[in-house]
Image (spheres, rainbow, N blue to C red):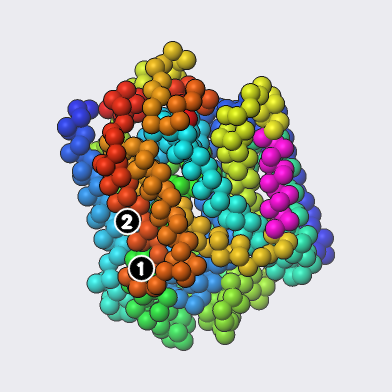
Amino acid sequence: MSTSLSLGVVAVYTLVLIIIGFYGGKITRKTREDYFMAGRGLGSVAVFMALFATNITAFTIIGHAGFAYQAGYGAYGYVIGWSIFITPFTYYLVGYRSWLLGKRYGYATQPQVFGGIFNSRAVSALFLVLLLYYTLPYLVVSIIGGSLAFATISGGAVSYELAALFIVGVSLLYTVPAGMRGTVWTDIFQGSLFLVVAVLLLLAVANALGGFSAVTARVAQENPALLMRSLSPSLAPPNWFSFTFTNSIAVIVFPQIFTRLLASRSSRNLKRVTLFYPVALAAIFGVSTLLGVWGSVAVPGLAGKEADNIVPMLIHRYLSPVWMILGLLVILAIVKSSIDSQLLTVSHLVTEDFVTPYFRLSPERAVLLGRVILVVFAAAAYYIALARPAAILAIAAFAFSGFSIMLPVMIAALYWPRANWYGACAALLLPAVLLHLWYLGLLPAWTTFGLMPVVPAFFLAAVIMVAVSCLTPAPPPAQREKTFALFL
Amino acid sequence: MKKSGFKFRFGLVLLIAAAMFALHNSFWLWPLDGRLPFLFGFMPFAFSYYVFYALLAVAAMALVIKLAWPDPPERLLEPAGEAEPAPSTGGSGRPPTGPPGLTL
């Protein structure tokens, strides 16, 4: 009864996605601009949900709740605290000026925007290679995380392999025909679904555990250390400070986020997004934190990675099977809304910045090629996700740092007319090389001053950008004018 | 908006960002974690602090918008035509291949 009901609900959910995708595809014109950028016509709600649903991954419900189970209430501030402000702030700092350039010159990706500002093919190529290098393992890890969660929450009824096939296959079914317009519509559907159901889930778990106050009193009595940040080794101030340089500032560098910002119809829409964002981020991570901490007294004794399953365990132990189905939908909605945009963006980058500049293609053929590339990347990501190589997890873990250290170049390009392509190339390459050396253990640990490697690498990128630009010829006035005349 | 005025306003925006950074890395407040009563009976200080921080972030972004986020004039947003002068230095000197004006 429960299994057939679950299958029925998942089937309806899948059907809704496919219908939305096909309808999106039906009204999408056969041009790159329309397929990959939705004609730059996204309204406030569409941009917000597209960014938010893309930003939230399986980590929110699985990894973060597990972390809160072990580290306590402080996990909330550690993981998402700085993001609550800095993510929307970078949408202003980098997003708005990039959006202006995109509107004016037709840029659609980072290689185009920053290659265009510096008038340099080298900068464009470096952006393309680094973004693909960091995005691909992130995509694979998203598939792995989502498939594991799906398999776990289904209680073993769906194998890991089948879950991965379902997640990638359904994403392809609606993303291939629909392009960005269809994925944004599915993001609105999936984002609303996971926000509403996550809050309902919190209320149901609180009710099952005796109410908000009762379960909190139990935490204070049975595990008071979870209330105090200073008692959690993983929240130690050097870690806390370092973490502000990883996931929070990396978001604007994610190509799937950057492209969606450029697809906004107007600057006013972007402004509204920056006002909605802090509340939405705080809400979804707040739910996840509370569930994780409450789990520490409701399902005690989980160690290490076991704690990552705390939300499915809470549902399984305290709620009716119907909640298991809703929990499954939340996981699927969160996972797929990220994977579809990652797949589309990888296809977009390769089509726009690698294929199109070298081969003369008609608009129809470029869109067709984009779709083929999308399928090829999805198949490759599925295959790697099945193998689950340990190296992929390690690369993805440091991919956030890799994205973060590209930010100084993006800010300099948009705010400092003296910045040039020599500085940009050096500031993209050298810190990336050093980051690899630190993560591979080839540089002594003391060289990071007790912080995560991303912190010195970030400041090094800023210093190199300034120093190399000052030591090499300034950009010609006409080139500077082309960018900075827009910002007056 | 005058350029010099914008610089001052943008300086204020950076101060807002610095203040928010300091409020996030507010280790001096951590000793309050176990001492203050729970907000609404279920939010310990380590949690409720970030509920307030989120509200403050909305106010901070509203201020940023007011200070230094102008709505661009329509004429600036008209797509640049093929006739737009495209500088061709600093890179490989190849002919434009990307969007108008871009020499990669």
Magenta segment includes A88: no
- Relative to residue A450, is residue A60 drawn left or right? right
Give how far across and how far down residue A213 sits, in percent.
45, 75
Q: CA distance from mark 2 to mark 1?
A: 11 Å
Residue lying at 43% horizontally and 50% vertically, measured from the top left: A429
> How many callouts does the rendering have?
2
- Of mark 2 and mark 1, the one earlier in the sequence is 1
Residue lying furthest top: B83
- Relative to residue A238, is residue A253 drawn left or right? right
The residue that mark 2 highlights is A459
B103 w.r.t. A197: above or below:
above
The residue that mark 1 highlights is A448
Q: Amino acid at mark 2?
A: Phe
Q: Bounds of the magenta span? A: A370-384
Quadrant of the frame with the N terminus of chain A? bottom right
Give how far across and how far down residue A277 sits, in percent.
43, 48
